[in-house]
Image: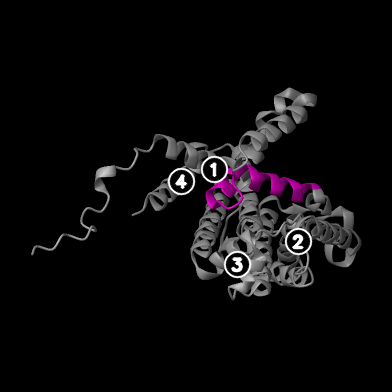
Amino acid sequence: MSRANAGALVAIAAAAAIPVVFRGSDYLLNLCVLAGAYSIAVMGLGILLGYAGQMSLGQAAFFGIGAYASGWLTTQAGWNFWEAVPAAMALSALVGLCVGYPCLRLSGHYLALATIGFGIITQLVLVNWKAFTNGSDGMSGIPAPAIGAYTIDSYGAYFYIVLACVSAGAYVSSRIKATRPGRAMQAIRENELAASAMGIDATRYKILAFVLAGAYAGLGGALLAHSIKFISPDSYSFDASVVFLVMLIIGGASSVGGAIVGAALLTFLPEVLRPLKNSYIMVYGAAVIAMIIFMPQGLAGLLQAVIARFSPPPDPGSETIAARPSAQRS
């Protein structure tokens, strides 16, 4: 078993113990569920930005589409949680396809501006399409998941559903990075022209990145909607997209574990700083800026640097003595 796989199993086991250790603390468990839902959306943004190099400031829009789709299907169409969540993922992925295709010729800040426009339009639709979203009043009464007669309505039990989705999302994202599509996305990120010259279909893989980012965000939004049981358009504004981007940058743009840690850190940091009252937002902003300046590669890059610093140097005497051609005896 590799070191990365062993670390992932230890992290999952530690996370699985959280509801047991903090039993009875609904506030903390709710924050853990929130961090898990955010981390799924940030992992999707990591595929789009960290793998394919496509800047997006509209991830909160996909998050909201998934939340409203699952909420409407369960409250109005009579679907259950297990049917509505995959459908919400599929709808968000379809919207990602529709957004990604016309944005193919854009890059850098032009693409960012286009995704900002998409996010603003999505929020306006959520506010004004009252027959579907109930407008600014929001959507309430979103049911908790159920298995037969058992309703999973406690934060501790629901946390395991979120943990399973985070683990599955992390596994898929890490596998994508090691496959041909993932390597093609990384080539496009480094130099799209050179990648195209080598036969990589940049159009196809950029659209795939948008679709995957939408599916991940839709899953995270749906999970959060069934946890808090109420959603409103205010939660899916441009500000939320910026927070997702900051989470990714702090964790490490191309690191799956970094995306999870960055989402968890920025979910809990405001709560830790809450006793500062009016000045907490200033300290919060200063802390984020400091992390971005002094850790440009994110927490994942910092961890890699520490490991490289304390790892033993390679043994120069082990350099392929066997590989040297032996002198032939005459």
The image shows residue 277, relative to residue 173, as above or below, that is above
Q: Position of residue 68 (x, y in %)?
A: 76, 62
**Quick check: is 268 in the magenta stretch?**
no
Amino acid type shown at disc 4: Ala
Q: Which mark is residue 107?
A: 2
Can you identify the residue that label 4 sits on?
Answer: 11
Is residue 144 or residue 292 the one in the foreground?
292
Task: Note whether 128 is above or below 318 in the view shown.
Answer: below
> Residue at the location (49% across, 59% down)?
171
**Mark 1 secondary-structure assignment:** helix
User: Between tags 4 and 3, which lies in front?
Assistant: 4
Task: Pick the residue in front: 223 or 153.
Answer: 223
In space, the residues marked 4 and 3 are separated at their CA atoms by: 26 Å
- How has the structure been colored for display? one colour
Residue 231 placement: quadrant: bottom right
The residue identified by callout 1 is 301
**Residue 299 can be seen in this image:** yes
